[in-house]
Amino acid sequence: MLSFNDSDIKTNNNLMENTILLLQSGGRDSAAAAVELLELGKTVIGVTLSADAFNKIAIPKQRAVELAMKYKFYQWHMIDFTQWDRLFKESVESQISSELPKSCLLCSLSKITAMIPYCKERNITQVAMGYTEYQSTWAEQTPLAIELQRSFLQELGIDFILPVQKYKNKDGIKDFLTVRDLTPVSLENPCCISRWGTQVVSEVLIQETIEKSFNYLLNNVPKIEIIESVGTQETLVCP
């Protein structure tokens, strides 16, 4: 059973119970996820994690400013997690039984695990991703991967929220953003894998990778740095 020592964590107040941390690339899916949650009355903290955050702020920041201008209870952080990402991937890849095909699986897990202590320190008990049905063949978004990620996060006291999982095609996401006067094109820094497509990862390897990832988190403390923020309830930082 996975567990953190919560002796110094205060009981969630109403604000934190209504707050959701969203891992947000700046792309269409995570932008739509933010809007879905905001329009349900949630407070959304969007985070974009990058191992090269200092040089890759501009594009996803455009999305953050756009959302913050429209929604009062939205804020965003660009976070550098270079050290955690490198050591996490080296460790997990060295422990799994075979080479991991090129996919977004390990990157997604690196980002999710990096944010768990951030959530625990702030009594945030809900983490959201922009997973969609039309990308359900991607390793991190398969039914098995979602079930496992949700299970491990629940053991840590965190609910795994997928606000746009219902979308069956990209056009539905584009239309959703367009009618709200939000940019329907992607505002993210795509890597070569997300740009060219991901390879199939076996269920056995998906399970092994997810298990090793969360076990690594239990014995290591993520080091992250907030590089820049946009939007709070009091003020908006424009570019």
Image (spheres, rainbow, N blue to C red):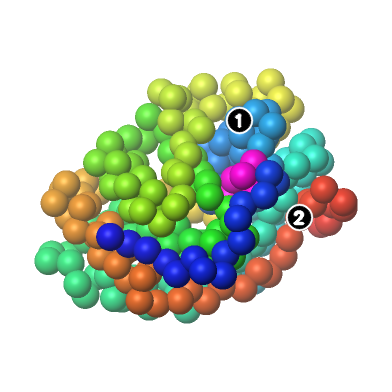
18 magenta-colored: yes
Q: In percent of the image, x 13 and y 51: which residue is there?
A: 204
Cα–Cα gap, marks 2 and 1? 19 Å
Image: magenta residue range? 16-21
For residue 171, side relative to residue 210 (left or right): right
* Disc marking residue 230: 2
Q: Which residue is mark 1?
A: 36
- Residue 161, above or below 215: above
The amino acid type of the residue labelled 2 equals Val
Position above or below: 35 against 195: above
Taking the image as drawn, is residue 62 in sight? Answer: no
Residue 17: where, in percent of width, then height? 62, 44
Look at the image and tell me in which quarter the C terminus lies: bottom right
Q: Residue 81: x and y, percent?
A: 52, 71
Residue 101 placement (x, y as % from top left): 22, 57
Q: Position of residue 121 (x, y in %)?
A: 59, 65
Tell me which corner region of the image, top left, top right, bottom left or bottom right, holds residue 39. Answer: top right
Lateral position of residue 201 relative to residue 62, left or right: left
Residue at the spot 72% in from the left edge and 50% down from the top edge:
75
Quadrant of the rendered structure where residue 44 is? top right
Say which amino acid is labelled 1: Glu
Badge 1 density bin: few <14, some 14–19, many ≥20, Cα 10 Å: some
Does residue 57 belong to the magenta stretch? Answer: no
